[in-house]
Amino acid sequence: MPSLFKASLVLIILLVNHKLTLAQQDCLDATFLCSSSFTQNNSYTGVGSEQEVAPGATCLGNGEVNSAWYRFTVNTSGSLNFQINPFNPNDDYDFALFDLTNDSCSGILAGTTAPVSCNYSSSPGATGLSNGSSGNNNGSSGTNQNAQINVQSGGSYALLISNFTASQNGYSIDFGGTALIGDTEAAIPDSIGLSGVCNPNVILLFFDEEFDCNSISGTSEISISGPATVNVTQVAGIGCADGSTNQLRIRFANQIPTTGIYTITIGSGSDGNTFTDGCGNEVPSGTTYSFEVEFIGPELQVTNVLPTNCGLNQGSAEAVVTNGTQPYSYNWNSSPVQNTPVASSLGPGTYRIRIIDDNGCRVQRNVVITNNSPFDLTNTSVTDVSCFGLSDGSAQLIPTGGQGPYTITWATTLPQNGQVASNLSAGNVTAQIEDATGCQESLVINIPEPSEIGIDYTETRPDCGSNNGSIAATGTGGTGAFSYTWDTNPAQSTGTLNNINAGVYTLVATDAAGCSNSETIILNNNFAPAADVIARVPDCGQETGSVTIEPTSGVAPHTFLWNTTPPQTSSTATGLVTGSYFVTITDANSCIQIMNIKVDSVPPPELTATLTQPTCGQADGEIAATVSNGTAPFSFVWSASTNTTSTETGLVEGYYEVTVTDSIGCSDSQTYALAQLPPESEITISAGCLGETTSFSFTTNSVATSWTWNLGDGTTATDSAPTHTYSSSGDFDISLSLSGGCMPHVVNDIATVYAPPIVGFVFVPETPTTRDQVTFTPTGTNGTTFDWDFGDGTSIIDPNPTHQFLIEGFYDIQLTVTDNNGCEDTTSQTIEVLLEPVIYFPNAFAPNGSYENKVFKGYGIGVTKAELSIFNRWGTLVYFSASSREILLNGWDGKVSGKDAPQDVYAFKLKASFYNNTSFEKLGTVTLIR
């Protein structure tokens, strides 16, 4: 807000015209009105980047039309009126006036900020606010004059002017009333906000009026001097969404390391100017503002960080604090919270350590607890599988590290224990290692094997009745070179057979590692007879299968030779079981065709069953049969009934036989035994905290017809599921007596009722101010979780929190404590927070003026005593008062011995005491203006 001295200068130059650029068409880019009269030579057409006032959102029925936006600031409080005077009296202008003192252009766009005055009259000519008019919202049929409004010094307004007739003739804007607008003075810093009283790394510098955010040029306009070097790393406006601000955020490279008085100096930046307001006024280069750093906060290093092992809570870290003011408060966000320099029993993860010193200065750091494996599992050896498909591989693991002895378990089909796993197939095998402390880790080891041996061959068929055939074979895969063995007589050991007849030949190929594979090759004659095959599968796995050969070529008659035992020579082989058979077909020209025929079979049905044993004294047993294999559909015969389904129910203790028969007559029979289950019952108790209802229920595998509960405190119940509220905490012996079925039967259990925690709390200071950090400490026993509600909309879960109340008043503090059993209790207290006592004075006053500051008086909160002395420039005492009431209510009226003191700068000395037993002294100057 402009000072009184600046406001008096406005009286002299208020009507001086400024040379302004054309008005802009968006609220954010509005033209600032810097005097009481402004001329818009040419009107605008269209709207800005978007229509910020939509049709119907205000009295402007069409919204913005050929619009322009203006901004102005009120210098002195009073009544305000203005006239928009078209250069062509037939032009029709409309307007909407918005109060943006505590609002912004974004509120207008969002439709949440309504105009304080709006006129949409269809009458041409001058329009605006005038003395004697009424109403603040005139529509198209209303008058074009609204009532004048009352405004306060420092108020900020936006004026939207719409040109309904769309002419380009222009207009003037002329302000009147007792309030004055305009600004010829630059913004001046008037207060500061620190990031705490401790050595800050950022401050907020407040100015008495807003300036253009675009005039901030990085860090070049701000320098800071004082007991220590301060490197400014950032200068940024706060709340620049509307293009202007009265707050700067000034950030430093590091926290200020030394206490004392520091001075901010504003100079011309890299853009050639300082901070400039909307009317072109620059902050004078060399303007200074001082602030004090009262305390040096603590510095924190986290050392001795030890990792945890095996994911257990074995990690630790130590907070080492220097500087600041002891004692220090430690807070580790572990679970549970730890309040010592060393945090222990930490699992893997990231932890925050926060330090608060005796002055309330804070610092915090994060520390990462890593997880170490104690094992070294690199000492391994592997024996490959010798031949493809075998299971003769092995692996050995010798762990080191950790704490022996070790337990090693191999995840094989049949688990193996020890350092060596044997009889392994190719692939991955997993070893699980556990040391004497219970730390575990697993390791996957791969067991290789050679590739599978294959045999490739080509054949040359012999002529009928001739031995001019051949087979050339080559081994593939395996390891190294191959050797060959044929089942000829005599045996041959080369890869090629020559001069052979039609027949069946078997070759064994063996590689260099001794691994082998075989291939059976059928060699037929050229022009061998063909035949159809008709096969019948054997029934129920018996020797009832058959195969019939029907030649379709060759010269009859044909002869047949089967490799059955004994050999069969007819075209049909009988008595066959499942398997593979060779038949040699020879026609009259001695041409041979050898065929390999596979005979499949349908396996007979096999029975399995799921048994439900009968309960005590009941016929509720069951056998549910399941059939595998066989040919559906199936039929069932039970020994105990005429039931033909797969499930027999209503059974008592005994033996039961069931036979299943499939559709082709194959069957299977099984006998199953059912045994009566002994009576078993179980009690379920939902016990909790003292004062809560405990419920009881039971389950049994028998039939209970009556029951009696003994609830352990002298109470009995005969309900099947009673409830009970205990009057004390503790363990209660519960017994349930059941009868019926195989009863009587007694079941016992224990109901535990937990006592709630005892809760209370204290806080210091007992009567805090808005500046104090209030420390809360719980009292009582058994609490593990402490949930605080501070009554100001904030809450925290912390055993010993601190909190600052920013607004005076009474706050209801509620603490809810929960123990390990989930029991909780709540207590509350009311705390009174007082305003931070303060006293301050203006830097100028005008006894003969029409402004608020006609006397030099103080403004204070919580002042109990005050003493004010004022001296002229020669050191003569011109005013003295030891009455705080007089100093705060009446002050000095600018007279000395009943006569007006001359306009000058006077020195003053103030001593004050506050209700919280603190005191304050200040030396300053004040300008008397006449």
Image (spheres, helix red, strand yellow):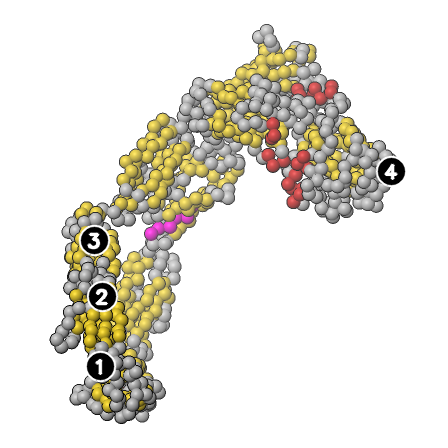
204 relative to 709 in the view: left or right: right
Seen from the viewer's position, the closer of residues 583 and 578 is 583
Vertically, is 558 above or below 427? below
**Separation of disc 3 and disc 2 at Cα?**
47 Å
Q: Amino acid at mark 3?
A: Glu
Residue 233 part of the magenta-drawn span: no
The nearer-to-camera label among 1 and 4 is: 1
Numbered mark located on residue 475 in the image: 2
Q: Secondary structure at mark 4?
A: loop
**Separation of disc 4 and disc 3 at Cα?**
98 Å
547 relative to 149 in the view: left or right: left
Q: Quarter of the image for the N terminus: give it.
A: top right
Q: Amino acid at mark 4?
A: Asn
The nearer-to-camera label among 3 and 2 is: 2
Q: Secondary structure at mark 1?
A: loop
Numbered mark located on residue 90 in the image: 4
Q: Amino acid at mark 2?
A: Gly
Instruction: Decide which of tag 3 and tag 1 comes sooner along the chain.
Output: 3
Instruction: Decide which of tag 3 and tag 2 comes sooner along the chain.
Output: 3
Q: Which residue is mark 3?
A: 434
Name which residue lies at 33% across and 30% down: 321
Label 3 crowd bin: few (<14), some (14–19), many (20+), radius 10 Å: many
**Separation of disc 2 and disc 1 at Cα?**
28 Å
